[in-house]
Image (cartoon, grey):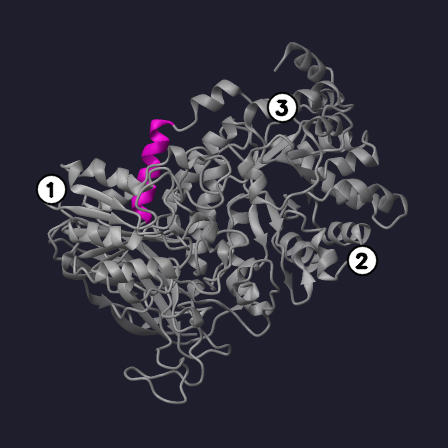
Amino acid sequence: MGAGAVAAWAASPARAMLQAAGNLPVPAFIDALIAKMTVDEKAGQLTLLPAAWGGGVATALNPPTNGPSFEEQLADVEKGRLTGVFNGNGAEMARRMQTVAMTKSRLKIPLLFAADVIHGHRTIFPVPVGEAASFEPELAERTARMASYEGAAAGIDWTFAPMVDIARDQRWGRTMEGAGEDVLLGELIAVARVKGFQGKDLKANDAMLACFKHFAAYGAAEAGLDYNTVDVSERTLREVYLPPFKAALDAGALSGMASFNEISGVPSTANDWLMRKILREEWGFEGFVVSDYTGDMEMIDHGFAADAREATKLAFLAGVDMSMTSGFYRDHLPDLVAKGEVPMTVLDASVRRVLAMKAKLGLFDDPFRRIDVKREKARSRTKPAIALSREAGRKSIVMLKNDGDLLPLPKSGKRIAIIGPFAEGKHDINGPWVVYGDNAQAIDLASGVRAAVADKGAVSVALGSGVEAPLAGGIEAAVAAANAADVVILAIGEAENMSGEAQSRTEIVIPEPQMALAEAVAKTGKPIVAVLKNGRALALEGAVLNAGAILVTWFLGSEGGNATADVLFGDYSPAGRLPCSFPRSPGQQPYYYNHKPTGRPNPEGALQPYKAHYRGIPNSALFPFGHGLTYGKVAYSELSAPATLAWDGEITVSAKITNSGSRAIEEVVQLYIRDRVASVTRPVRELKAFRKLALAPGASETVTFKLSRAQLLFIGRENKPTVEPGLFDVWIAPSAEAEGVKAQFTLTA
């Protein structure tokens, strides 16, 4: 910070009030500052815009707008018309903007700098759904902590993460940004990421404010179409879609983002039942809510608001404190207040929340605490960050099948052909929703494989096809490479631009040109390891499904190639589990493991007529939630479960887990229940606990879980949590559709 800026800050009214407040609570200082603000300045504190000085990636990630230039934004800062910007160009940009705020604006209120730090800043970690596959919340906390360490050094105070939407329809492109289809896993990952981003002290220069999104039920968009209508019962909303938001709030998240979608005819951006009754009155949320990108503007196209002025009024009175991108609040709140349509007390309450958050972030103490160009460079892509990216990558990989123990591959003595559009090249490695990372710095698959084997000359590469278009002569070259090799690594799947926001797909399959490549390579008869790149569950078929081994590698980030090689060659035994069910066909969507049984479930065995299934396929997953293999031989046995659970008591459920294989492994042991009879129909299974267990070769361990009445609660007919005495099934199993070991107990009144 320049000497002039320091002097101006020291003499500013905001700083003077803060010093005068002494040990008084922050609200006293904030109220004194609000009393000095004009209505235009108050509206400015509720206005967030995309940074005019941003990067090409940031611009590409959101729809183009005719926004102001950087010089125009500096002028807005000077006039107090801007609370901050997002997705800007690092510490130097932030320094220049904050200097204007501290030297030229009337009240010297510091700016807030935000960004989409979704799965890493400069060092990129697996896409969130991939990281959720680790079934290791502690890992998600560590990667979020590292992302905050890097991002905060670049001047970022606030990240638009975590996304905690439950995704039950894999056609939805933003599946990649969340934790999958299960509520419990979603809650645990939400808590972990909030704690990671925010750290132990929000004022620390390595902490960023977390923002839970998208409130609410964005993942329930009809037909998996992004931005589409949502129409769910209040019971489903409270039982499935709201719990991860509540978990994030309870973990300390102090900002939230309204979702684009409507719920039962009311856009979330103007849904006072969501924003005021549930979020503030029921849950006691004390932070602030920001609209999503042009969310207030979009209510006009929804047919919910006639114009910008009405959209502003509806959103603001519903409880959305801050407007992102549209500028509606800055343009229309002053007149709405002047005309008495928005009470000044309501305006002041929102401004108070935003200013209080700036105080909690330490910006009134030191507006430049996160802005340091030298620190930005020093914290970028450090050795610990790169190592963590590799660790997170290999822990995120899920092995779907491994016929004949094809994997792990030997590091010598085998000729390996890597075939497919993702075999090599600095592209499609980091994954969607990366603003600041660079694929040019990431490790591709061929580089990772060559680094792992003894003879780099034994590795050949043939692209074979493009991602969604054939490659002239590609299949012929790929077949030749396969014929000359002992084993084929088939690197296929989705490109980065096939997952993420606005990337819903009707057919969640491997694109046709890649399937043609896979079929041609399969005809060579060579063993095939399919290495999938994907941001969602896929419906696998043909030569891909018939491959000897299948690895789901998602988008693993900076160390993707090295992490994949670690698993391919046995330096790490795969331990990931599916956070979303892989369907038998795209037409099954939405499919999720904890579905209701219906009144006509198909019994075990052959498909029967007039039962709940599609023609020719059972109502089950191809690879279910929780599924994933290791390099061990795992068996579940000796289930122990008491016959009764007292109303105010607790039972211990246990099973013996044995690894009879020759390799050390990690097994994700999962506990499921089913309420057999209830006043509201219950799912066929519900995950209630899991444990990641390390097992040496030949070792056994008894895994125990505690169950109490609290874990059996469901949302009853009055849309409130309830539980009823009765019979429950309980499983300890390796997936949501595996039998594992099973017992029953009765909850007694």
Which of the image's four quarters has the C terminus?
A: bottom left
Residue type at mark 1? Ser
Labels 2, 1: front one: 1
Q: CA distance from mark 2 to mark 3?
A: 39 Å
Is disc 2 in contact with disc 1, using a CB cutoff of under 8 Å?
no
- Residue closest to the eye, 443 or 151: 443
**Where does the magenta region start and end?**
382-396
Return the disc, 2 or 3, that comes first in the chain's sequence. Answer: 2
The residue under the point 45% across, 81% down is 598
**Residue 306 got which mark?**
2
- Residue closest to the eye, 498 or 400: 498
Q: Residue furthest bottom?
A: 609
Secondary structure beneath disc 3?
loop
The residue under the point 81% across, 29% down is 36
Q: Around disc 3, counting alpha carbons within 10 Å, would you say few (fewer than 14), some (14 to 19), or many (20 or more)?
A: many
The location of residue 17, given as percent across then percent down, is 73, 23
Q: CA distance from mark 3 to mark 1?
A: 56 Å
Return the disc, 3 or 1, that comes first in the chain's sequence. Answer: 3
Q: Around disc 1, counting alpha carbons within 10 Å, would you say few (fewer than 14), some (14 to 19), or many (20 or more)?
A: few
Apparent side of residue 380 relative to residue 202 in the rendered image (left or right): left
The residue under the point 67% across, 32% down is 26
**Residue 367 got which mark?**
3
Residue type at mark 3? Pro
Q: Residue furthest front?
A: 473
Return the disc, 2 or 1, that comes first in the chain's sequence. Answer: 2
Labels 3, 1: front one: 1
- Residue closest to the eye, 432 or 688: 432
Which residue in the structure is indicated by mark 1? 412
**Residue 374 got which mark?**
none
